[in-house]
Image (tube, rainbow, N blue to C red):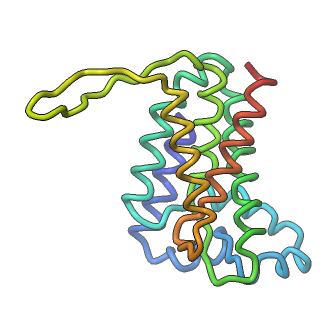
Amino acid sequence: MLLTLAFLFFLIITEFTAYQPKLMELYAIHTNTYWSLIQQQPLELLRLITATFLHGNWLHWIINNSIFLLLAFSIEKVIGGQKFIFLFLTCGLVGNLAASLFLQGQDNLLIGASGAVSGLIGVWLVMFPRKKIDFILPIGLYLQKTSMPLAVVIMLWLVVQIILQFQPHPSYDIAWISHIMGFTTGFLLAWFVK
């Protein structure tokens, strides 16, 4: 998919070339200066999208891209490529917007596709509400195969995101609010595109 190739391209540039500081300077969201920068140069709003395609390291990229690949093909098959790209970019934009507002004035670098990928989780919940996930549960010395509705797993994931966002002394190495708002955006938009 085109978006996967874009992820890989930006990761390679970000990780393996001398351009990393310049790319982060030009395309990432620096939460302590972002909103004052927009007042001077409104086109800087594009960073709400460009930051989606930058990742800090291999692990960050692998996690986002694994979830992306797990969900993207099924969703795109149902709604088509154009709607899929619209959903993905909109969820990323809203997630980054929420995080940049929430973290405004703090010294954070906002990058990654987590808001967009979380949006795909919301879309998946609407489009495939009866899907089940199989897993193996260790019970004593035995392994028991069981299944659980994916909706339950997703709701547990969402509760964890909310708890982590609003814990008393949160670490903002991960923009949990981006996950929450990306998910919410995907969940709501999915009703209109399915």
Q: Indicate the position of residue 68 as horizontal and vertical percent values.
A: 50, 39
Please report the residue visible at 55 percent of the width from the left and 28 percent of the height from the top: 151
- Snapshot quadrant of residue 128: top right
From the viewer's side, name the closer residue of 138 and 87: 138
Q: Residue furthest left?
A: 141
* Residue 43 position (above or below residue 120): below
Q: Where is 13 relative to 93, above or below?
A: below
Residue 41: give x, y in percent of width and height: 88, 75
Q: Is residue 171 left or right of residue 92?
A: left
Q: Quadrant of the C terminus?
A: top right
For residue 28, side relative to residue 57 (left or right)? right
Residue at image point 74% right, 41% down: 185
Residue 152 left/right relative to 58:
right
Q: Nearer the viewer, residue 187 or 63?
A: 187
Position of residue 180 measured from the top left corner of the image (x, y, whole percent): 65, 50
Q: Quadrant of residue 75?
A: top right
Q: Is residue 7 above or below residue 29?
A: above
- Locate residue 87 relative to residue 73 in the image: left or right: right
Residue 150: horizontal and vertical position, in percent?
49, 26
Looking at this view, name the residue that lies furthest to the front. Answer: 140
Q: Which residue lies at the image location 71% right of the left edge and 42% below the top edge?
A: 184
Q: Residue at x 89, y 69 (%)?
A: 42
- Label total for image: 0
